[in-house]
Image (spheres, rainbow, N blue to C red):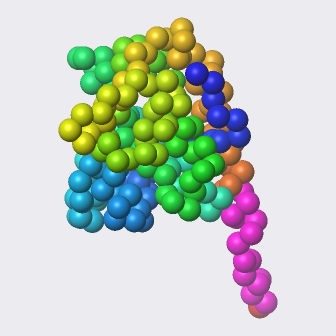
Amino acid sequence: MGSVQGIAVQRLNPRHRDDIARHLLQLPAEDRRLRFGHQIRDAAVSAYAAGIDFARDRVFGIQSADLDLVGVAHLALDPVQQAAELGLSVHPSARVRGYGFALLQRSVLHAANLGYRALFMYCLAENGIMLHLAEKAGLSVVIEAGEADARLKLDRSAHGGAFKEAMADQFALVDSLLKQQYLWLAAPKSEPVAF
């Protein structure tokens, strides 16, 4: 599974909790319902972001030019079962740019490099965007009782690559630094005070 050219996917950490919560809270109510599988209130979204276990799980994000998260993937890792469950969202203003596919591919790469055997995605059967992404990425999809279960058997040689992941991390770091630099240069400068 190759990477999506030109899309920087950042690995997020606990310092990004507020950014993750802000991204999820900015999703329209219907997108939130599709992301979580049911209606979810703001307080529950905030609690979800606050409860992400960064020591176990991995979270990836795509930042806009102003460093806001426009896409987030939460890779929940089960070390006992050697399985990873993926949930992802992309803000409507950033769709049809390959961001969801880039987040999915980055998650598959990371899970395969950790030696996990399977990646799962669960969603409502009506979530056409997620079903399209799953099929595009080679996941087998089973729809039953209004829910869809997408699975990919991971193989490190087919889906992984330490060098590929290191390059993805470096590309994301450079992308973030360039965006920070641009914002700093574009910020209005205050006039020096004359004494």
- Location of residue 23 in the rendering, given as x and y in whole percent from the top left corner: 43, 59
Whether 42 is drawn above or below 55: the answer is below
> Which quadrant of the figure contains the C terminus?
bottom right
- Asked whether 145 or 84 is in front, the reply is 145
Query: Where, by quadrant of the figure, is residue 79 drawn?
Result: top left
Query: Where, by quadrant of the figure, is residue 162 drawn?
Result: top right
Q: In the rendered picture of this protein, how many numbered marks are placed on residues? A: 0
- Asked whether 113 or 181 is in front, the reply is 113
Q: Is residue 191 left or right of residue 2?
A: right
Question: In the image, which residues are magenta?
Answer: 181-194
- Whether residue 107 appears in magenta in the rendering, the answer is no
Q: In this view, does 194 lie to the left or right of 40?
A: right
Whether 92 is drawn above or below 37: the answer is below
- Asked whether 16 or 105 is in front, the reply is 105
Residue 191 showing in the rendered view: yes
**Residue located 69% across and 64% down the image:** 183
